[in-house]
Amino acid sequence: MTPRIDLHTHSTASDGTLTPAELVRAAADAGLDVVALTDHDTTAGWDAAARALPPGRTLIRGAELSCRWHGAEPAVPLHLLAYLFDPAEPELVAELARVRQARRERGERIVRLLQADGIEVSWPEILAGAAGGTVGRPHIAAALIRAGLVATTTEAFGPDWLGERYRLPKDDIDVFRAVALVRAAGGVPVFAHPRATRRGRIVPDELIAELAAAGLAGLEADHEDHSPAERAHVRGLAAELGLLVTGSSDFHGSHKTVRLGAHTTDQEAYERILAEASGVTPVIST
Ligand code: AMP
Ligand code: ZN
Ligand code: FE
Ligand code: FE
């Protein structure tokens, strides 16, 4: 039987709602043979996920790095998935710590903007809600829901709220530097949801070609935020540039409606990732 492989999920180590242990169990229950844990800007969930991995399953340790391309004005934010990199590589560790700190400062500034408009949300409560994990707008969205100001996370990401009016940029990693750091740490970098126009601005194909020349390994094509036309475009571009193609759920627990395994990666692309990786091994539970 062909294995079912989902290479993009989030736990409470960032803005998902299942703990890393719950996540790997839920992945097995969803019939996945391979799941990657890719929390935003952190490897903090890796060990708990590895310990809880049910028998016969494989965990790919990864992260989703907050990056930025400075070739447009204003610079465009983007996400880079990184698989099987050495979590102790000093420069990468320092960059991730810096980004997490910047996310906390940005979260607090967003809360102050809300408070200045008379919206009663509490930063200490939001920080407690993140429970030590990487802070993101979904944690602020949860506070807006608790306050009865919006009904859903989707509504909280609308233009009147965190999507525009109360959106502040993150201080993140230059994308070329991120690709180089991930490769230097023995990891495999894959551009997450590169054509997701519904999330905001996207980057031109020329940039993706430059990133491919700089060490990018692949593109995520099958993703909730890509239309069928966007998925086809990504596949075509990957074929042109010799990049591998992934599909994944980007599961966030109850912060999003997408289910584990909603999109999957084929075995050939998965094996290419394994072949290119030298930072850490997949965790295989016997
Ligand atoms: P941040 O990293 O703080 O900028 O927040 C972005 C995170 O919020 C991403 O990881 C998304 O998964 C999540 N997100 C973005 N847009 C939405 C949306 N419309 N509904 C729910 N979650 C979203
Ligand atoms: Zn997220
Ligand atoms: Fe993302
Ligand atoms: Fe994600």
Image (spheres, helix red, strand yellow):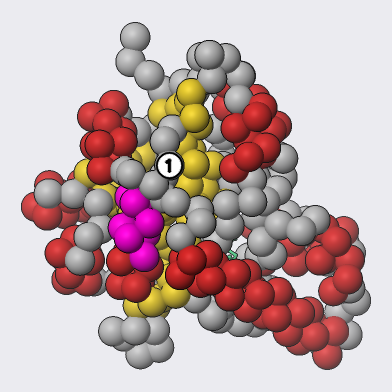
Quadrant in which the N terminus appears: top left
Q: Is residue 57 left or right of residue 164?
A: left
Q: Nearer the viewer, residue 175 or 167?
A: 175
Does the image show residue 180? yes
Does the image show residue 229? no
Q: Where is residue 18 in the image (x, y as percent from the top left)?
A: 71, 40
Q: In this view, does 264 lie above or below 94?
A: above
What amino acid type is highlighted by mark number 1?
Answer: Val
Q: Is residue 81 left or right of residue 243?
A: right
Q: Nearer the viewer, residue 199 or 280?
A: 280
Q: Where is residue 21 in the image (x, y as percent from the top left)?
A: 69, 33
Q: Is residue 230 left or right of residue 75?
A: left
Farthest-out residue, left: 240
What's the residue at 73%, 84% (across, down)? 109
Magenta segment: does it hold 37? no
Q: Where is residue 196 in the image (x, y as percent from the top left)?
A: 39, 59
Residue that label 1 marks: 280
Q: Within 10 Å of the Cα at label 1, are there few (<14), some (14-19), or many (20+) other Cα atoms?
A: some
Q: Where is residue 55 in the image (x, y as percent from the top left)?
A: 57, 14
Quadrant of residue 34 within the rendered picture: top left
Q: What stretch is highlighted in magenta?
A: 181-188
